[in-house]
Amino acid sequence: MASNGAVSDSGLIVSFGEMLIDFVPTESGVSLAEAPGFLKAPGGAPANVAIAVARLGGKAAFVGKLGDDEFGHMLAGILKENGVNGDGINFDQGARTALAFVTLRADGDREFMFYRNPSADMLLKPEELNIELIKSAKAFHYGSISLIVEPCRSAHLKAMEVAKDAGALLSYDPNLRLPLWPSAEEARVQIMSIWEKAEVIKVSDVELEFLTGSDKIDDESALSLWHPNLKLLLVTLGEKGCRYYTKHFKGSVDAFHVETVDTTGAGDSFVGALLTNVVDDHSILEDEGRLREVLKFANACGAITTTKKGAIPALPTKTEVLSLLNAP
């Protein structure tokens, strides 16, 4: 399998978008208002993916904007400590690093409260992009939060175009956060506005329902999101594993059963694992046997990530993944 090869000279995976600090209550199962205190947990889906790649031994870079403040420099430091190339990071003098207060309520649902009006990540301008870095990407990964407002939206579109022209594999995880959008309708329109460009798309079961407007999570519903440029469409189903769709075959891969503590970052870990394993060999996307092996590896990464609190501290190394894969 691809993940067993030497990856030191592997292709660069560039993640584009937001990095922020999640404040997580010290006590779980309470509302934000009732939380007695909060711990800071670095997050932001694209940054999580970059760190997931680096932890697995892949080559990762992050492109985005942080506040020129203590939190922003702390986040840049975390990327660096984890072996992620930070040459694409800009610092904004006037805007703060984004914050999010996140709690897992007693009913198991996550509650979000965001502080960004505007935060630094929203202010990345097209002319601030590190074009050389983006051109050197073999895979370019992004979400949809960077599409919400200008100038970041234009920077996102330009970065995507540069990566595509340079031959990178475009990977998209919409990562829906409804509280950040002006309306659900606007979220749907903007998420779909760049749909046709991506070659690999990962959606969760909840995002599938939102984008299709159907409450059915089945093949028909998933395939309504198919487009001709797509090489792989993935639907993640939490403890039910994932489903995959390509031009020539489709199927599902079971999840690993673990003691779940916090699901934050599981999807990002899954995407990081997938990209690390296919970045140097896109033919895996056309070979069902090899693709299933890669998805099993990605499911294992996602599972391990749910066994610890917070996204980044929980992202696994290759050794941890292999020990889960080889467990009796």
Image (tube, grey):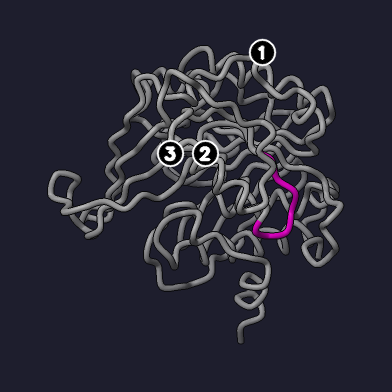
Residue at the spot of label 1 = 127
Between 151 and 278, the one lying in front of the other is 151
Residue range highlighted in magenta: 55-61
Q: Name the residue under label 3.
A: 71
The residue carrying pointer 1 sits among few (fewer than 14), some (14 to 19) or many (20 or more) residues within 10 Å by Cα, namely few
Between 51 and 276, the one lying in front of the other is 51
Q: Position of residue 164 (x, y in %)?
A: 78, 25
Contact check, label 3 and label 2, Cβ < 8 Å: no
The answer to if 56 sits in the magenta stretch is yes
> Measuring 55% from the left and 17% from the top, which residue is drawn there?
153
Q: Which of 285/221 is in front?
A: 285
Residue identifier under label 2? 221
In the image, residue 195 above or below residue 307: above
Mark 1, secondary structure of its residue: helix
Type of amino acid under label 3:
Phe
Distance CA(mark 1)–CA(mark 3): 24 Å
Residue at point 71%, 33% (across, down): 170
